[in-house]
Amino acid sequence: MSCTSWGLSRCFGATTRQRRRRLYAVALEGSRAKSRRAKQHRDALDKSVRAFFKKKPYRIRVESDLQRGHHIVRLVNTPPRPPSKEWALIIGDCAHAMRSAFDYITWECSYGRGDRRTAYPICRSEREFDGVAKRKLRHLSPRMRAAIKSAQPYHAPNPTLTNLWLIETLDNADKHRLLTVTVSVQHSLDASFALPIGFIGVFNPSPRLFPNVQLKRNAMLAKITTPPYVKMRANFTPAIAFGEGVGFGGRAYAVDSLRDALANLNSLLASFRIVLANDPGAR
């Protein structure tokens, strides 16, 4: 494949080794390979979680006070223990593959000039970024450093709720201990209602859901208020979530969060490839 097909129109004067090195960096093949490995881990987690929930380990009951129109959705059985350790290992591997992909970006963008301090910073403040970038990004071009800076979590209203900070937090935690942050919670709840014969008026149920409640015996999933004598049935979809103690806010659905983080990684990879292809400092 020619250099011009990658947008490196001025690389013909370079040696064969230099051209190969620059093409490799623009393709970000190492980072993309890590992204593909992260997707394999995320898919494995999704498959394992679906297999566990397919056994329908949770049973719920609607406790209704028809005269007052009060309904409580409650878990009535003692569910089996989910394979939390297995899930934690997969989550850790997925997070590490994504975090490694970001570090690969800085190495590949340094065209072999990087050293042991070359790494991708993930920061919650501009001051923190400016401090570490002097060491970690010193071998990158100004344009590439600016691109990495523009994608930092501190640009968001709450940096700890960003996909990048999720990856950073999970990877750091997994380096030192087995992640014990997966709990089973409800992902969604569906309700159907049977109105009494001759009902006249506006039917407007008032739900109060408790999605962060851990699924264990007698756990209350929802309180719903309706007009008197309205009967109700309910179904719910379970999920696994990270606990509040992991360091990036309240509970977040694990499979969904990893999917969003992976999509964010791939989007940034595509953006960085465009920056590199048009970066005069890379030629």
Image (cartoon, rainbow, N blue to C red):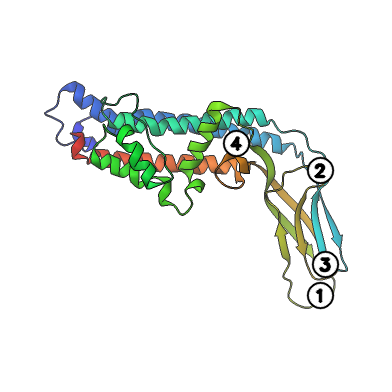
Q: Which residue is mark 1?
A: 199
Q: CA distance from mark 3 to mark 2?
A: 24 Å
Few, some or many residues within 10 Å of mark 1 (<14, 14–19, 20+): few
**Furthest residue toward left:** 13
Location of residue 144 in the rendering, given as x and y in whole percent from the top left corner: 28, 40
Q: CA distance from mark 3 to mark 4?
A: 38 Å
Q: CA distance from mark 1 to mark 4?
A: 44 Å
Few, some or many residues within 10 Å of mark 3 (<14, 14–19, 20+): some
Q: Which residue is mark 2?
A: 217
Residue 64 position (above or below residue 200): above
161 vs 68, left or right, is left
Q: Nearer the viewer, mark 3 or mark 1?
A: 3
Q: Quadrant of the N terminus?
A: top left
Res. 91 visible in picture: yes
Q: CA distance from mark 1 to mark 2?
A: 35 Å
Closer to the chain start, of discs 3 and 1, is 3
Q: Nearer the viewer, mark 1 or mark 2?
A: 2
Secondary structure under the numbered disc 3 in the rendered image: loop
Location of residue 62 in the rendering, given as x and y in whole percent from the top left corner: 82, 55
Q: Which residue is mark 3?
A: 69
Few, some or many residues within 10 Å of mark 4 (<14, 14–19, 20+): some
Secondary structure under the numbered disc 4 in the rendered image: helix
Please name the amino acid that badge 1 sits on: Phe
Q: Which residue is mark 4?
A: 46
Q: Are marks 1 and 4 in contact (CB under 8 Å)?
A: no
Q: Are marks 1 and 2 in contact (CB under 8 Å)?
A: no
The front one of 147 and 189 is 147
Location of residue 179 in the rendering, given as x and y in whole percent from the top left corner: 61, 31
Please name the amino acid that badge 2 sits on: Arg
